Image: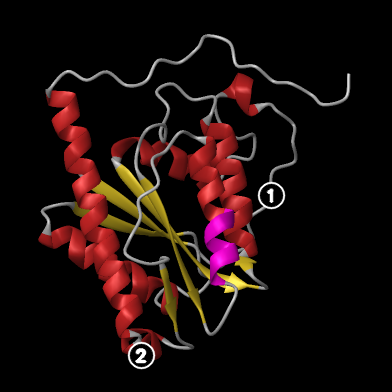
Amino acid sequence: MKVLLVNGSPHKEGCTYTALTEVASALKEEGIGSEIYWIGNKPIGGCIGCYQCGAKKQCVFDDQVNEFTQKALEFDGFIFGSPVFYSGMNGSLMSFMDRVFFSASAKDPHPFRFKPAAAVVSARRAGTTSTLDQINKYFLHQQMPVVSSRYWNMVHGNSPDEVRQDEEGMQVMRYLGRNMAWMLKLREAGDKAGIALPKQEETRKSTNFIR
């Protein structure tokens, strides 16, 4: 079993990375493999609402979004990490996640559905809870069980060294790694016991409020 840890920060080995590596260490102790995927620091275009991904089975902009969505098929769980920018996630990560999760809905097999996921955020001071809420909404939309820790999944600091001094934050990351491992093992046990995934209705209902 493997977990894909997404570093949404423009800094490859900054505060967000430091938090994710602590999660990865806890996963390793539980016998779960992991990989950190950095989205980079180049501009990532947002979704333009063309709805062509339904026909093409991928985003019309053939860049790292399609690469990542294909790669996601190989993994059993996901953790998306972001620094806090104005009480929200990094803009590049938001564009990335908008396109990844919208275009993924057209793929079969689905790369995310029913796979456990979690968000991790890093801040110098504030804006963490609103950022967690923002990221978690993607998982809820895709029927992904959201993995908790013993507190909100956040670290504080203005540098990797300061983040490592956030003893509570580092402990929260370790709890998150262990809880993710537990969830994956439960899923594996359920599969072995023949417990089927929840039934999907053939037609998705889409109701507009103005008719």
**Residue at left offset 54%, top offset 71%:** 128
Residue that extends furthest to the right in the rendered view of this protein: 211
**Residue at left offset 60%, top offset 64%:** 130
**Residue at left offset 35%, top offset 35%:** 73
The answer to whether residue 169 is left or right of residue 87 is left
149 w.r.t. 9: above or below: above
Q: Position of residue 21 (x, y in %)?
A: 29, 69
Q: Which residue is mark 2?
A: 161
Q: Is residue 28 magenta?
A: no
- Type of the residue with mark 1: Gly
Q: Main secondary structure of the magenta part?
A: helix
Q: How is the image coloured?
A: secondary structure
The answer to whether residue 160 is left or right of residue 41 is left
The answer to whether residue 203 is left or right of residue 78 is right
Numbered disc 2: secondary structure: helix
**Magenta-colored span:** 128-134
Q: Which residue is mark 1?
A: 46
